[in-house]
Amino acid sequence: MPAPSTAASLYRLLPSLDKVLQSPDLEAAVSSHSRSAAVSAARAALTRIRAEIALGNADEASVRSQISALTTTIKTDIQRNAQFSLRRVINATGVILHTNLGRAPLGRSALDRISEVASDYSNLELDLESGNRSRRDVHAESLVLRVLAMKTGFQPEGDRLQRALVVNNCAAATFLILNSLADGCEVIVSRGELVEIGGGFRIPEILRKSGAILREVGTTNRTRLADYHSAISEQTALILRVHQSNFRIQGFAERPRLDGLISLARKNSVPLFEDQGTGLIVRLGSRASDTESSFSRSFKKGPDVIAASGDKLLGGPQCGIIVGKHDLTQKIAKNPLMRAFRVCKLTYAALEGTLMDYLTGSMECVPVTRMLGLNSTEILRRCEQLASSLPREAITVDVVPSHSLIGGGTTPGKKLNSFAVAIRHASLNANQLANLLRQSKPPVIPRIQKDSVLLDLRTVPPESDAVLADLLRSIGTQVIGSEPSSPAHVDGSM
Ligand SMILES: *Cc1c(COP(=O)(O)O)cnc(C)c1O
């Protein structure tokens, strides 16, 4: 531990703030950013050295070395401070709904709606006809119902009249529905559906937190209608059906069809709540079997309440959409917790923009729908074009068949045929190369397969191909020494 006099002499080694700022080395950084950015970065750097001295962690050699690195430290700081934490990245993983990468990218219509609605005041809670205060949930409601009606050709009437509500996400929707309709009462759930949806969202725990009492029926692999039937009692408030969105039970497995469960629920006057999850509205076509659960198919079959995610296969903003019978949704809307789960105007704007694309038949404008429908021949063509534009000095480039995933816990095990550009670097291993790509501007997130870095172009917007090519060209011509790497692997899980 240095003596106090030593500390004082160490402080004397430090240059003044003015002197640091006059350093010619900082001139460019100061002029391309602002003087105040340079001042605060320089002040912070000097403060850090002073703190080291005060703590007794410094000696003359360490202080001198920090002083000589001062301008470099300050320049790095200025650049880092000018950067946002949340940034756009190029997703070259081929996982369409990548939870770590923000799930669904928004389409033009959604972005335009956000920009228009948020740049000035809006009628968020004002009825323009009467001038009276109104509810915010009216905004997306009619579009949600019209899109579902249009896609299914089904228009609910009478006691099946529906309402739609929007909350923060599907997890919030599920919680709110259980709390509004089953607090203190029993909810019947198949043991095969007591699942973890992801990110710690476990059905039994959510159920308990909501105040509902879990009444498990059947077994993990087999649950029959009769199991549900015999569990119905005076205490039953709800039957819950959870879409098996992120897993499959194969082999000796059985669970009732949704129709069967709906008629059982109706016969016994118990409401049926389906946690549908994926929010799929269009057909996945030949890419999925006809038994694939979808938001629109559920809407047509008519469980009493359905919850779906806004930013999975619907391709909209993060939100949870609740569609259900009038009396039930009324109860949900009146729950005081609705105030805590409500969404902001940006979400309504983005959701309306996305739904309008469905309504006008411009589904291809919704990026998730477009990426799902991309032809692998088209992806191959783009891969070949990209590959042919790259230098072969420091890298080896191949175009290889690949499988894209839908991801986001929506369609377990479902793969889409695709192509990828596979890159190997002369002096970097795959992890190091992936690291380098993540540090580039904009960051590129690849997939690693064996000793190659794969760039699956299905999830790369075609307008980003050129940016990607530029980045790869600069990496491909640099022969870089082995850099320290921390292989932070991003996976496609929830
Ligand atoms: C994804 C999913 C959820 C959670 O949705 P979030 O919008 O992420 O909260 C709930 N239930 C099912 C069946 C899901 O697939």
Image: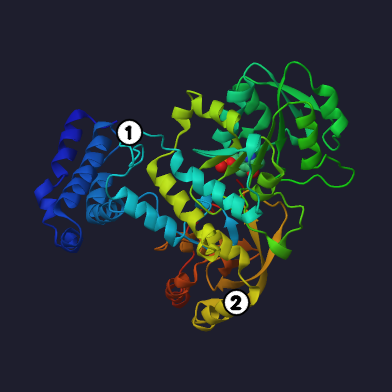
> Residue at the spot x=79%, y=35% of the render?
263
In the rendered structure, find residue 360 and report the number of the disc placed on it: none
Question: SS at mark 1?
Answer: loop
Q: Nearer the viewer, residue 249 or 41?
A: 249
Task: Kindly identify the residue that appears in the image at 87 percent across and 30 percent down.
Answer: 226
Instruction: Decide if residue 264 is on the left or right side of residue 442.
Output: right
User: In which quadrant of the rendered image does the C terminus lie?
Assistant: top right
Q: Position of residue 336 (x, y in %)?
A: 47, 23
Q: Say whether marks 1 and 2 touch (CB < 8 Å).
A: no
Q: Is residue 342 left or right of residue 242?
A: left
According to the image, label 1 marks what residue? 132
Ligand 1: quadrant of the figure:
top right
Report x, y in % for residue 187: 71, 24
**Type of amino acid at the residue the image marks with label 2:** Glu
**Residue 236 in picture, x, y percent from top left:** 73, 20
Q: Is residue 349 left or right of residue 411?
A: left
Residue at 25% from the left image edge and 53% from the top image edge? 78
Can you see residue 54?
yes
Residue 378: which numbered mark, if any? 2
In the displayed structure, 484 sits above or below 205; it is below
**Few, some or many residues within 10 Å of mark 2 (<14, 14–19, 20+):** some
